[in-house]
Amino acid sequence: MRAGIEVNPRDDDVGPLLNWRVLDETAELPAIVLGTSSDRIGTPSGRAVYATASKDLERWTGLPVAPYAGITYSGFDHAFDPIGGLVVRFDGFSTTHLYDGDNTHHLLSVGLGNGMSVGVLYVGQDEEDYWGLTFGTSFAFEPWASQ
């Protein structure tokens, strides 16, 4: 389980960011993840709830790629949409290519260590091009760990 706060200052939106890995990926089976976040990029409001399956294919293909596919419920549109994407890893960088049910986005990110990352995001939406910067961080919190 991962929990956080998602901040989208341009839309004056703050909300929960939750991911629960229901099933861990195995050598043969994909991981299954349920979660919630802000609705897709470009919606003025709403939360999304989603389920995805993802599988790292490097073992089978020799390529550092991990596709995912799933379904999301858009709180803005009040509709279900297919979602999917592909993560490609190389030399400390990764690229993520996402389809959110309406538009495609591309993210180039690099890990900075200590759970932090920065990235450049390209969004093609409604025949317009948008660029942005991302920053992510994580904190270790293990309330059930033995002392």
Image: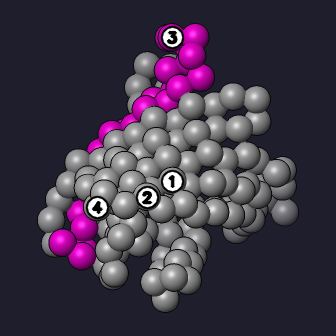
Q: Is residue 57 magenta?
A: yes
Q: Which residues are magenta?
A: 53-77
Mark 2 near mark 1, Cβ–Cβ under 8 Å?
A: yes
Which of labels 2 and 1 is toward the front? 2
The C terminus: image quadrant:
bottom right
Q: Quadrant of residue 70?
A: top left
Amino acid at the residue labelled 1: Tyr
> Distance from label 4 to label 1 (Cα)?
13 Å
Amino acid at the residue labelled 2: Asp
- Where disc 2 sits, the SS reads strand
Which of labels 4 and 3 is toward the front? 4
> Distance from label 4 to label 3 (Cα)?
35 Å
Q: Which residue is mark 1?
A: 122
Which of labels 3 and 1 is toward the front? 1
Which residue is most to the front?
128
Q: Which residue is mark 2?
A: 129
Q: Which residue is mark 4?
A: 126
Q: Which residue is mark 3?
A: 61
Amino acid at the residue labelled 3: Thr
